[in-house]
Image (cartoon, rainbow, N blue to C red):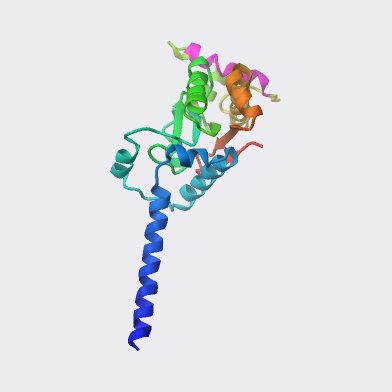
Amino acid sequence: MYSRRAFVMSTALSLVAAGTAQAQDACAVFNPSRQKATTPQDALRLLREGNERFLSGKMVNCNLMQQVRATAQGQAPFAAIVGCIDSRVPPELVFDQRLGAIFTARVAGNFVNTDIIGSLEYSCKVVGAKAIVVLGHSDCGAIKSTIDQVKLGNITEMLSHIEPAVAATKFEGKRTSKDKKLVQAVADTNAQLAARMILARSPILKEMADKKEIVLAAAMHDIETGRVSFFT
Ligand SMILES: [Zn+2]
């Protein structure tokens, strides 16, 4: 009787230990050796899995101050995200990532320019990130404003970066932001154009992609569901 109880106890304890180990694993910060062992496809998988956790409400609960201490001497993130400033699409939350895991560059309409591409070159060539994801989203205010040709202060010039996506989107009918299908079609085009532009404008990242040292992808976040879908 005693031994059976002891067995049950030890099984329960080892389950607790396994659970703790799992949580610690999920909260282990990326360091250079972990980053090196991550392939570009692994990096995309980690982001997909993170979004699944976000969708299911089973996000990893980490001690962030412990992560502050663990990353104090350096960072080795596995991916870089180019996203919109929209308050509903913070990459760290929708991909369920914490300190030291992903670089994020955010600008209204998730377009790329020299500054953003330079930031990506730093992320991948200098620090070793394995994947770049351009993350567009549905119902994007910057996309809608570009379709409606809004003119206002510095916004005018900012939106000029999104105009090529509007022009490249085939659409029958009146071009207005009231048309949700058009807004989504332009957002889809915009994210994919940005991903292509990164390679076209960065010989450094193009070479890394050709050598399969990094992977580049575009994705779309649906603000109504929280789901991120990758373009293939
Ligand atoms: Zn947006």
Tell which of 77 and 199 is nearer to you. 77
Inspect this view and state whether residue 204 appears.
yes
Say above or below: 94 vs 185: below
Magenta segment, prevailing SS (helix, strand or loop): helix
In the picture, measured across the screen, residue 172 lies left or right of residue 99, that is right
Tell which of 73 and 108 is nearer to you. 73
Tell which of 64 and 222 is nearer to you. 64
At 35% from the left edge and 37% from the top edge, which residue is drawn?
A: 71
Q: Measured from the top left, where is residue 221 in percent x and y?
A: 53, 37
Residue at the extreme front of the image, as rendered: 33
Q: Quadrant of the N terminus?
A: bottom left
Residue 86's image quarter?
Answer: top left
Q: Is residue 162 magenta?
A: yes
Q: Measured from the top left, where is residue 146 in percent x and y?
A: 54, 19
At 56% from the left edge and 43% from the top edge, which residue is drawn?
A: 42
Residue 99's image quarter?
Answer: top left
Q: Measured from the top left, where is residue 206 in percent x and y?
A: 62, 23
Q: Measured from the top left, where is residue 82 in percent x and y?
A: 50, 28
The residue range painted magenta reads 156-169
Q: Quadrant of the C terminus?
A: top right
Inspect this view and state whether residue 227 appears.
no
At 40% from the left edge and 36% from the top edge, which residue is drawn?
A: 100
Give the number of callouts.
0
Say above or below: 94 vs 24: above
